[in-house]
Image (cartoon, rainbow, N blue to C red):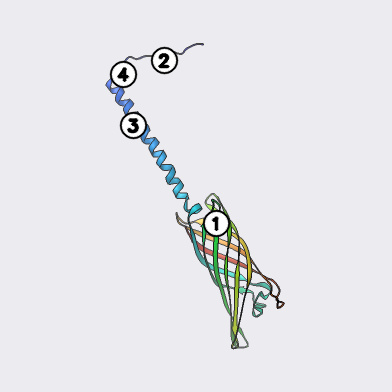
Amino acid sequence: MARVALPYHGALGPGDIDVQRHSRALATLVCLGSALAVPRSVQAQTPSTSSTEFFGGYSYLRDPGASVLTATEGDDSFPLGWAAGVARPVRRAIAVVGDVSGQYKTRTTFDNDVKLSFHAFMAGPRASATIGRVAEFAQILVGAVHARGSGFGVTTSLTTLGVQPGGGIDYPLGSRFAARLELDYRWIKGSAEGREAANQLRAIVAVVYR
């Protein structure tokens, strides 16, 4: 096997030794900088995957078919509403979510104001994934839906079971904040008194903090 001979320039002088020392020191600093940069990069992404989330914002509800309150028949929009909640990660892409919301409107019937409202208290699992800068999620929540109506001196209310699958996207506004768009479908259980099961649609625009 042929050997390649490297040229020999004689013994190393003091200048050469200094160059080697500086080169080794520079290489050590580069390695340390790289090692420190990795944890910081991971920490910058941590809030989206392992931090407790809080959100709150505007909620719009459509209640086709009168749902629980028959007074809403022919007027199925609830344009005034809010939604808020919290999510706690349990695994890398899975979280447990708690969600509360309220929807309100007033209708004038025969010169009398009828006030209507819905409140929902729900919880369940959420799965999420990040694609580029946008985080996408899907969830299914179960809980109680409370409906209330008052007018003509009479108040009636009803609480029933609700199941609410839905999903949305989060767009980052900074290291801790994000803007959320969410769309949910809500199924409301019927009653033994003959009230049929009903459906609702909910849209949310919210701010998320992690």
Q: Is residue 171 above or below residue 196?
A: above
Residue wearing tag 4:
12
Residue wearing tag 2:
6
Label 1 amino acid? Answer: Ala
Label 4 amino acid? Answer: Leu
Label 3 amino acid? Answer: Ala
Mark 3 neighbour class, 10 Å CA radius: few under 14, some 14 to 19, many 20 or more? few
How far apart marks 3 and 2 lie (CA) works out to: 26 Å
Residue 148 lies in quadrant: bottom right
Q: Is residue 25 left or right of residue 59?
A: left
Q: Earlier in the sequence, mark 2 or mark 1?
A: 2
Mark 2 neighbour class, 10 Å CA radius: few under 14, some 14 to 19, many 20 or more? few
- Secondary element at tag 4: loop
What residue is at 53 percent from the left and 54 percent from the top?
90
User: Residue 107: horizontal and vertical position, in percent?
Assistant: 60, 81
Residue wearing tag 1:
95
